[in-house]
Image (cartoon, rainbow, N blue to C red):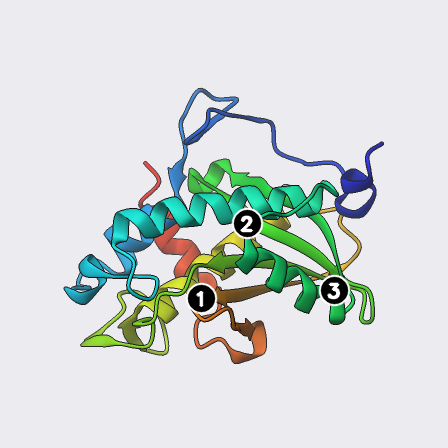
Amino acid sequence: MSNVETILGPPSNAFKWMRRYVRFNNGRCSRGVTKIIRRIFASNYRFKQLNRTTFGSMSRRVSKRFGTRVDTAIDHWVRGLRVKEQHVRSMVKQLEQWSWRPVTSQLVVARPLWRLATRIDLIVLDTLHDVLLLIEVKTGCPYRHESNGKMMRFIRPQIYNSMLHQHQLQAVLSAALFSYTYPNCTYAVEPALLYMNHDGSLDLFRESQFQVHFNESIEQVLIGTSS
């Protein structure tokens, strides 16, 4: 049994990762978390500045490439390899100061009932509190607090439609999928958001700071749109 299975336990769902989606045993293909957030929960979101820049002064295309490099560097850290990306080296130094130990990265989690799947960017073990943190890593997004003045759909109580709230929904959906995929995990589990800013600083949001929380209303939307 690998170190990951020792901590997480065996997965309960049978599915096959197909690079961009999951194929379940019943032959159906999954939807992605970020896509359903954009199409269902945040379909009224418009913010033109996000089309011009997302990470400091980077263009959206360059920022996406940077995000891929960050994912690779995080994977290297998890596997004990040398981390070349400076921003990730700074992040690793901070996480290690918090006594957070890497468990795995890009973990696939899914649930057939919702026809939903995603990959969790980084999972670490807070060794001081025995808490498993499911972290969505975001490369900056300086406009994450901005809203177009409209509310997110199907979220109660109502909250403004901002990138920050969309990211919180992504994190709690990932945590819910994790709970169904790894029901035998004995650690307390908590979703978190980690923003890597262009100046090298980090902004961490723990679940207690979230305005979005998973509930039955959200689950019913997922079930009702899964056909």
Which one is in front, 86 or 184?
86
Q: Residues within 10 Å of mark 1 (few under 14, many from 20)?
A: many
The alpha-carbon separation of the residues under discs 3 and 1 comes to 24 Å
Residue at 52%, 52% in the rendered image: 174
Judging by the rendered image, the residue that carries numbered circle 1 is: 168
Q: Earlier in the sequence, mark 2 or mark 1?
A: 2
The alpha-carbon separation of the residues under discs 2 and 1 comes to 14 Å
Q: Secondary structure at mark 3?
A: helix
Q: Earlier in the sequence, mark 3 or mark 1?
A: 3
**Which numbered mark, 2 or 3, is in the foreground of this view?**
3
Residue at 48%, 44% in the rendered image: 69
Q: Quadrant of the C terminus?
A: top left
The alpha-carbon separation of the residues under discs 2 and 3 comes to 17 Å
Residue 21 x/y as whole percent: 42, 31
**Relative to 157, 136 lies left or right:** right
Q: Amino acid at mark 3?
A: Glu
Q: Secondary structure at mark 1?
A: helix
Q: Secondary structure at mark 2?
A: strand
Residue 133 x/y as whole percent: 66, 61
Q: Is residue 47 visible?
A: no
Q: Is residue 193 visible?
A: yes
Judging by the rendered image, the residue that carries numbered circle 2 is: 121
Residue at 43%, 49% in the rendered image: 67
Q: Quadrant of the N terminus?
A: top right
38 versus 79 height, above or below: below
Residue at 16%, 64% in the rendered image: 46
Q: Amino acid at mark 2?
A: Asp
Judging by the rendered image, the residue that carries numbered circle 3 is: 96
Count the numbered circles shown.
3
**Which numbered mark, 2 or 1, is in the foreground of this view?**
2
Tell me where residue 95 sits by quadrant.
bottom right
